[in-house]
Image: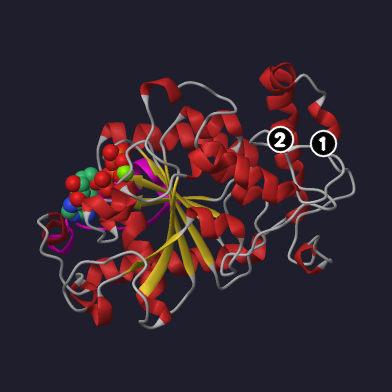
Amino acid sequence: MKIAFAGKGGSGKTTLSSLFVRHLAARRVPVLAVDADINQHLGTALGLPEEEAAALPAMGARLPLIKEYLRGTNPRIPSAEAMIKTTPPGTGSRLLRITEDNPVHDACARRVRLDPGGAPGHASTGAPGGAPGDTVRLMVTGPFTEKDLGVACYHSKVGAVELYLNHLVDGRDEYVVVDMTAGSDSFASGMFTRFDMTFLVAEPTRKGVAVYRQYKEYARDWGVALRVIGNKVQGPEDLDFLRAETGDDLLAAVGHSDWVRALEKGRPRPFTELAEADREALRVMYGAADASYGRRDRERYTRQMVHFHLRNAESWGNARTGTDLAAQVDPSFVLGETAARAPQPV
Ligand SMILES: Nc1ncnc2c1ncn2[C@@H]1O[C@H](COP(=O)(O)OP(=O)(O)OP(=O)(O)O)[C@@H](O)[C@H]1O
Ligand SMILES: [Mg+2]
């Protein structure tokens, strides 16, 4: 299950992503966390010390390796250089599973150990042992520079995540949780259509719901499942405001959390001490995410990735690579759970 957290800057995307990841991990659901935000804070929100978070391998710097692995023996993709961030998989491409070991995970993912047994203490990477529910895998795009912003192509670091998601075959009881960057980058590339569920994090403010409205328009056009999660909601008036502005899209609300504040102070508390109302919000979110499985449409999913590929090919990709990238599309290919069972190139 592919879940995105989007919303205005500072609304709490990273915080709610990390709480949702912890909730899944506590329920022993395999989960891979992905930091695709401009401000890379998911690692520390999961409890990693700053130095360890800063030392995480950047997916953006490993694009050649990712492309080389994913193209496999796909005859339509003669080289990694000919692959752009929207190049769709086809016959011969290598597909990815969330829980497997593969060269992409080896290069880009690190295990983060959440507070062992719910006891206070920092997480750390690569720590051996511990029950499966105590660790999650984390991948990061890498920090953005001024240069990256507004460059809707090739070098765009989120492109690595888009490639990853477009080659991923995920079942119902395994999760990828992506902390997204708000706004136009994800709309330009089609990344926002790659999720089973998008949680739009909104504070009860006019600016918070303005981002929701913009997202909602794109969501409607592309059949994206979008639900609003209120954050820093401090009472009935806040809740009334969100309900009035977002209607039935409002799924759950998280309060201003002492637990989160304690973590920010470097005094983490066991996850079991999160306020009951916030735990309930996480349960509701998990339920909504899980229910979205039944609405999957693999053909539409594949069609959309082809659509965005052709759009990128025409607007810059063909010129950049000097080839007709439309030829990369395998018309008979549909990405689905059965596709993963087809023989894989070695
Ligand atoms: N429910 C909450 N209770 C207490 N503090 C919160 C809560 N949600 C977020 N915060 C705090 O608000 C700040 C912004 O949250 P966060 O970093 O999660 O937002 P963001 O949307 O990821 O921001 P950015 O756009 O900068 O990535 C952080 O200091 C975080 O600890
Ligand atoms: Mg953030």
Q: Which residue is mark 2?
A: 83
Quarter holding the C terminus is: bottom right
156 to the left or right of 242: right
Q: Residue furthest top?
A: 319
- Residue shown at the point (83%, 66%) measured from the top left: 342
Q: Is residue 40 left or right of residue 235?
A: right
User: Can you tell which quarter of the image residue 330 is in?
Assistant: top right
Residue 250: percent from the left, percent from the top? 39, 52
Mark 2 vs 1: CB contact within 8 A: yes
| Residue 253, magenta (yes or no) | yes
Secondary structure, magenta segment, majority class:
helix
Please report the bounds of the magenta region as a residue range. 239-260
Report how many numbered discs are placed on residues in the image: 2
Question: Is 3 situated left or right of 102 in this image?
Answer: left
Helix, strand or loop for disc 1: helix
Where does the N terminus fall, quadrant-wise?
bottom right
Above or below — where is 28 with respect to 191?
below
The response on whether ligand 2 sits within 8 Å of label 2 is no
Q: CA distance from mark 2 to mark 1?
A: 9 Å
Q: Nearer the viewer, mark 2 or mark 1?
A: 2
Amino acid of disc 2: Met
Q: Which residue is found at the position 61% from the left and 40% from the top?
A: 64
Q: Quadrant of residue 98?
A: bottom right
- In the depicted structure, whether residue 184 falls above or below residue 28: above
Give the residue displayed 81% in from the left and 48% down from the top. 90
Residue farthest to the right, as pictured: 332
**Can residue 235 be seen?**
no
The image position of residue 208, as x and y in percent, is: 31, 37
Mark 1 lies on residue: 328
Quarter-of-image position of residue 155:
top right
Residue 50 in the image: x percent, y percent? 22, 51
